[in-house]
Image (spheres, helix red, strand yellow):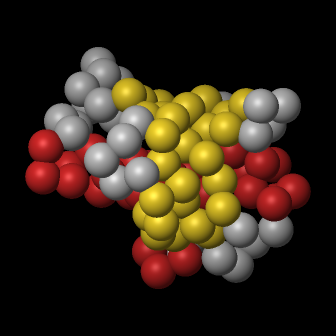
C-alpha cells in the first residue's frame, strides 16, 4: 500500500503527525533536503515508528518534493494508521 507523506526538512525536532482523516502523514525531520538526507531521515523515522524492517518501506515518488509517496509492505492500512496514532 502507498501513503502520502508531507515532509518539513530542517525542523527543530523529528516528529510524525498522522492525519487519517486527510489520509496523509506529516513528518518533520532535522535533516537538510540536500543529497537525499531528509528522505533517508523520513524513512528511518517511519520505520522506527511503524516497527517494520528496512526493506518493507520505500520511497516511490516525490524524491525531490515535500509531498512524497511511500510504499509500505507487510501491514494493512488499518494497522498502519493504528500504529501511527498509538505512538503520537
Using the rendered view, name the quadrant where residue 2 is placed: bottom right
Q: Residue at x 69, y 45 (%)?
A: 84
75 versus 77 height, above or below:
below
Q: Quadrant of the C terminus?
A: top right
The N terminus is located in which quarter? bottom right
Q: Residue furthest top?
A: 12
Q: Is residue 27 above or below residue 48?
A: above
How many numbered discs?
0
Image location of residue 8, percent across then percent down: 38, 28
Q: Residue furthest left?
A: 35
| Residue situated in front as seen by the camera: 43 or 65 | 65
Q: Residue at x 62, y 38 (%)?
A: 25
Is residue 70 something one can see in this rendering? Answer: yes
In the rendered view, does 59 fall on the left or right side of 39? right
Kindly identify the residue that appears in the image at 20 percent across and 50 percent down.
37
Horizontal side, residue 53 vs residue 10: left or right: right
Residue 4: image location, x then y, percent? 61, 47
Q: Against 58, is 6 above or below?
A: above
| Percent position of residue 65, x then y | 37, 41
Can see residue 87?
no
Amino acid at each position: 500500500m502507498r501513503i502520502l507523506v508531507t515532509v518539513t526538512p530542517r525542523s527543530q525536532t523529528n516528529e510524525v503527525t498522522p492525519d487519517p482523516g486527510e489520509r496523509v502523514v506529516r513528518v518533520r525531520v532535522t535533516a537538510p533536503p540536500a543529497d537525499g538526507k531528509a528522505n533517508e531521515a523520513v524513512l528511518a523515522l517511519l520505520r522506527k515508528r511503524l516497527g517494520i524492517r528496512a526493506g518493507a518501506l520505500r520511497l516511490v515518488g516525490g524524491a525531490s518534493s515535500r509531498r512524497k509517496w511511500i510504499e509500505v509492505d507487510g501491514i494493512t492500512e488499518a494497522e498502519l494508521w493504528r500504529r501511527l496514532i498509538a505512538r503520537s
